[in-house]
Amino acid sequence: MVEYNICFILAKKRIVKINIALGDVRHGTAGVHSGFVPVGIGYIATHLKAQLPECSLDIRLYTDPEAIIQDLESWRPNIVALSHYMWNASLSYRICEIAKQIDASTLCVLGGPEFPSGTGQSNLSNSKELCRQYLVNRPAVDFFCYSDGETAMLSILKAYVQKNHDTDGLIQANVPIDGTVALSTIDQSLLVGRPQTRIGLGDRVIGRDVIPSPYLDGLLDQFLDGSFIPAIETQRGCPFLCTFCDQGLDSTKMVSFTVERIRLELIYIANKLAGLSEARTLAIHDSNWGMYKQDVELARSLRKIIDVYDWPKHISISAPKNKKERILDIDVMLLGRVAVGLSQQSMDRTTLKEIKRDNYTNEQYLEFVKELQSRGKAPGCALIIPLPGETEESYQQSVKILIDNGLTTGTWTLMMLPGAELGREKARREYGMTSRFRMIPRQFGEYGRKKVFEIEEVCVATNTMTFDAYLRCRRFSFLMYVLGMNIFDPIRKYLAELNISYYDVIRGVHAAVESGSLSSNFGRIYKEFSEEAESELFKSREQLVCSLSVQSNYQKLLDGEIGDNLLRKYSTIVLMDHLDELTDYVYELTRIRWVSQLEDSTQSAGEAVVKWTKHRISIGDYGEVNNSADSAAYVDVSLPFDVPLWERSGDKTLKQFCYPVHYRVHSKMHQLQVEATAVYRDDKYYQMGRLLHTRELTDLYNEFVRVS
């Protein structure tokens, strides 16, 4: 390896400005996938400037692919360095291709988790040939950063300066650069630079504060206009080894920014955004925020900011995988504004052990859920199929446990990430994994007259779950996701009083739609979901690209007919257009099947519950023209039972609230739409789908007040 003395080099050479384009590019053809401020490339930019003050660096940040492509022609950056995630991997590579076509001397660099080594790894021995082949298939890439981007990019820039900004000379030298991999120009072997220590591990006092703040430097001001969700990273690393995650291959030590550093950033952001109606959310990108004592200290600072600015209204986190009491205390401190939830992936203990995710017992997990519910939260849980050891029966048992305990439960197909343990050949053989390819929802576009698609490989069968069983589980997951939403909690609670299992009710609806006997709008939508859930899967990446490139299919992508997240797409259609119909059907099915429990004396109670269920959320009003910010519009609801009070009463029965009441209901949909439109653009169905997938349902509930 070569150590570069930049001061000595610059003393001998004329200082020349180096143009660097740093991009975290996102498709915007049919809705933005990631609406977050690109804080990651911000860290890289400020670190490069701080570490190389002798260099004249002109660094520009990009999220818009068209903007960077335009600047490739006009500005001519010397270096193009782009993030490489599953949702932008093909786009980032396409930009490298265009850069090389415009100027072959442009140094092109990628870095990110969509790479066989995984995220921030220190050992490439198990993936070296896969990494080599990955680069062979991407000749426009000069270097790939497998260590953290800040350190790897610094190594590249030092080498670039040492070679007098000569890209060809740097590449032809065939010298490994620390934190990166590249192909030898001699024999196409993989040149692996030394892994680099994560910034901050050598100084436990200031940690990652050695990286100047891109917020406080004003570098991210262009993204603080309400059209992006501000994001911070208080610490980097994850101590867990989940096999479905690309961070699970290496228990990298944790390293943090100081609380004071983050506090100053949050004040800066609040000063920029607090007055914007569309800027309500803060995202914390840590893998386990709320698990450490430092997080509590930061929460105290954040509470003071909330008291002054009433911002943020909503805090998005990845929930900690243990120390659950700590995040609950933090949520109380932050006025209930934290989206607290925790996914189990499976409730089958054998499966959880196989995926190294058995740090919580089912009992501990459900205890956590009950605590969240008692605090007015609407927790959700994400299951993954087909995981190792999971069967159709164990999946249904997991669903039953979760539904019976009041959780909104989504089911995701297992992504075979190239950097995750379950994406490796060893796991494929051991668990008999069969894969298919599908497009990542709405992630496509045409750049430089070439169509680009982001494609993921997913598991659709194992040696314990067949492909047909996977499809059955996926169809059921759609129904279970919709009916399991907390929107239906009044009905669920009412049925529990009558000793009727809500899971059994959902199974009854499932039997009806599977047989085709439910000839309603919902039955039609269920059929469309089922057909598309199978037709979106292709046996090879090449077949999928060929199919999507046909102009008629590409037009369907543009029109939103295909290529979306199916659970999001179809559940949003149901909830926005047919919620009342589905609510009536669920109750009617229950009334017919469990008529003995629904005697005449309880009939009016059940009808009151159904009526309130329809009014507690106004998803159907989302996007309506008359839903203006100045509108004092409301709906008056009269009920023979005080259902809203009963719903919050704990263990009391509905019969104890048998008296007429009148409520005035106000929708919060307009304020949510202002934020969602700024971030996710104009498609109201896409906006609502993103809200349903990223926000607690309680954020969407109507405000209501009892009127005497």
Image (spheres, grey):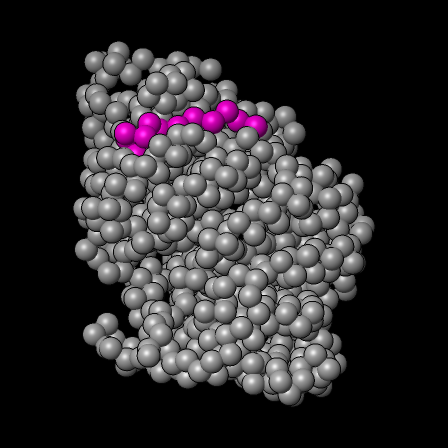
The quadrant holding residue 262 is top left
Q: Which of 131 and 48 is in front in this view?
A: 48
**What span is in magenta?**
251-262
Q: Which residue is drawn at 47% across and 15% down?
A: 1
Picture coordinates of residue 359, whole percent (x, y): 64, 37
Magenta stretch containing residue 261, yes or no? yes
| Location of residue 11 with respect to 227 vertically, above or below | above
Can residue 409 be seen here? The reply is: no
Q: How many marks?
A: 0
Q: Which of 521 and 99 is in front in this view?
A: 521
Quarter of the image with the C terminus is: bottom left
Q: Residue at x 76, y 55 (%)?
A: 394
The quadrant holding residue 632 is bottom left
Magenta stretch containing residue 69, yes or no? no
In the picture as drawn, the residue positioned furthest to the right comes out as: 463
Q: Nearer the viewer, residue 61 or 216?
A: 216
Q: 19 left or right of 604?
A: left
Picture coordinates of residue 651, whole percent (x, y): 57, 62
Q: 32 left or right of 301?
A: right
| Location of residue 452 with respect to 510 vertically, above or below | above
Picture coordinates of residue 129, whole percent (x, y): 63, 32
Picture coordinates of residue 388, whole percent (x, y): 74, 46
Q: Which residue is drawn at 54% across and 24% down?
A: 122
